[in-house]
């Protein structure tokens, strides 16, 4: 097979793969979730296997542990989140009206320095920004998100198929790796192995580390906001931590919601600044200590690239796309850097000017 034919062959294979993922995106989620869990737990299973424990027994133990963890979350944490989300969605219109009142009071203190036209324009902008349609939409958005999340979690495929996929992949992970390795073209074996190793390093550093980062941040934000006495502080903090895998977006969203609730609830600058400082401290700890320690500074995934991958994956394939966005970003990033190195080492880059 000539080089040009091989290029078209691989291009066709990639297009078929992308098309298949798009067509089957609605049924792929439990399988992709099972693969993700198997990848996360495989290093732990390798350690268990070193203790002379049969691999299938270790896979069964870890799968059972994952099931218990998910069910515990469903039974203990989710009812609390459900109650707070429903109540928060009901109280959002009141919060927005309270914020509007606070802003108008703040403007009134400087009214002597403003013209009558300026005051009227500010009031009109606030009224147009906080209109009934906007309040209804914002008040119901959390309930819609929650309803979608519960519907997803209640899918029988997710609850029953995912553990089965996780168990079999964990049990046969090493065997699958051997089979894939045996199919690699021998002339390029070392190069391909090196790229797979780089991809695995990036994924393991980002995914496994980011799970711990999000958990730590969720506990920190939720505990700190609850101690201050912020309404719905636990759910705001936990949600901020859980979506912190999207660089900066999680903290900014939590900051806006937390400070907004603080303005409506307290109206005192000391408490408002205390809420704001919690998010600033959390961001400082994440950027300077937690993420460098657990994830590393040289994972090769730029924050902008991560945000784009998540948005593109979610838009194209929904929840399935969110799961495969980071692996796809890691693969493209590693292969892109490899291609750049090959290009710079080639004659096209270094050829002398004629």
Image: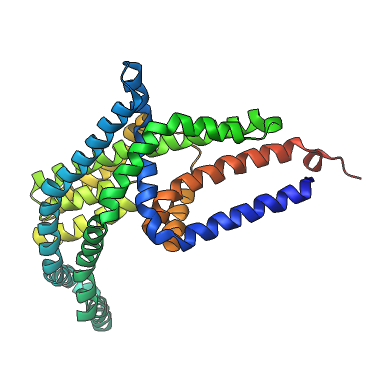
Q: Is residue 296 left or right of residue 117?
A: right
Relative to 143, say whether 61 is above or below. above
Q: Is residue 345 left or right of residue 328?
A: right
Can residue 258 be seen here? The reply is yes
Q: Residue at the spot x=20%, y=74% of the render?
A: 135
Q: Residue at the spot x=71%, y=37% of the render?
A: 342
The foreground one among 127 and 336 is 336
Estimate the x, y position of residue 289 in percent, counting from the top left: 33, 32
Residue 191 occupies quadrant? top right
Q: In this view, does 201 lie to the left or right of 16?
A: left
Relative to 277, say whether 184 is above or below. above
Q: Residue at the spot x=39%, y=61% of the render?
A: 26
Estimate the x, y position of residue 354 in percent, counting from the top left: 92, 45
The foreground one among 273 and 312 is 312
Can residue 220 be seen here? The reply is no
Estimate the x, y position of residue 134 in percent, counting from the top left: 24, 76
Residue 124 occupies quadrant? bottom left
Relative to 241, say whether 52 is above or below. above
Return the residue found at the far right: 354
Residue 173 occupies quadrant? top left
Q: Residue at the spot x=12%, y=55% of the render?
A: 232
């Amino acid at each position: 097979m000539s080089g040009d034919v091989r290029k078209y062959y691989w291009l066709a294979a990639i297009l078929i793969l992308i098309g298949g993922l798009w067509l089957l995106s609605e049924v792929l989620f439990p399988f992709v979730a099972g693969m993700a869990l198997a990848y996360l737990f495989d290093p732990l299973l390798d350690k268990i296997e070193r203790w002379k424990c049969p691999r299938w027994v270790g896979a069964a133990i870890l799968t059972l542990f994952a099931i218990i963890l998910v069910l515990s979350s469903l039974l203990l944490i989710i009812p609390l989140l459900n109650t707070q989300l429903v109540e928060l969605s009901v109280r959002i219109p009141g919060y927005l009206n309270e914020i509007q009142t606070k802003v108008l009071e703040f403007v009134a203190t400087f009214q002597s320095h403003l013209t009558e036209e300026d005051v009227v324009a500010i009031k009109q902008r606030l009224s147009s920004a906080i209109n009934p349609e906007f309040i209804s939409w914002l008040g119901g958005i959390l309930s819609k998100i929650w309803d979608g999340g519960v519907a997803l979690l209640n899918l029988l495929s997710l609850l029953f198929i995912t553990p089965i996929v996780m168990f079999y992949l964990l049990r046969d992970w090493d065997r699958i790796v051997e089979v894939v390795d045996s199919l690699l073209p021998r002339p390029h074996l070392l190069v391909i192995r090196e790229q797979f190793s780089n991809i695995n390093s990036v994924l393991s550093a980002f995914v496994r580390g980011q799970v711990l980062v999000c958990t730590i941040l969720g506990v920190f934000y939720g505990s700190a906001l609850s101690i201050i006495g912020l309404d719905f502080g636990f759910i705001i903090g936990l949600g901020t931590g859980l979506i912190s895998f999207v660089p900066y977006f999680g903290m900014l969203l939590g900051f806006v919601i937390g400070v907004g609730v603080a303005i409506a609830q307290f109206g005192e600058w000391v408490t408002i600044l205390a809420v704001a400082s919690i998010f600033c401290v959390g961001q400082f700890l994440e950027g300077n200590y937690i993420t460098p320690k657990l994830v590393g500074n040289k994972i090769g995934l730029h924050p902008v690239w991560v945000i784009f991958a998540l948005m593109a994956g979610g838009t194209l394939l929904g929840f399935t796309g969110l799961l495969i966005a980071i692996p796809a970003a890691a693969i493209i990033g590693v292969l892109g850097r490899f291609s750049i190195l090959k290009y710079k080492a080639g004659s096209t880059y270094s050829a002398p000017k004629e």
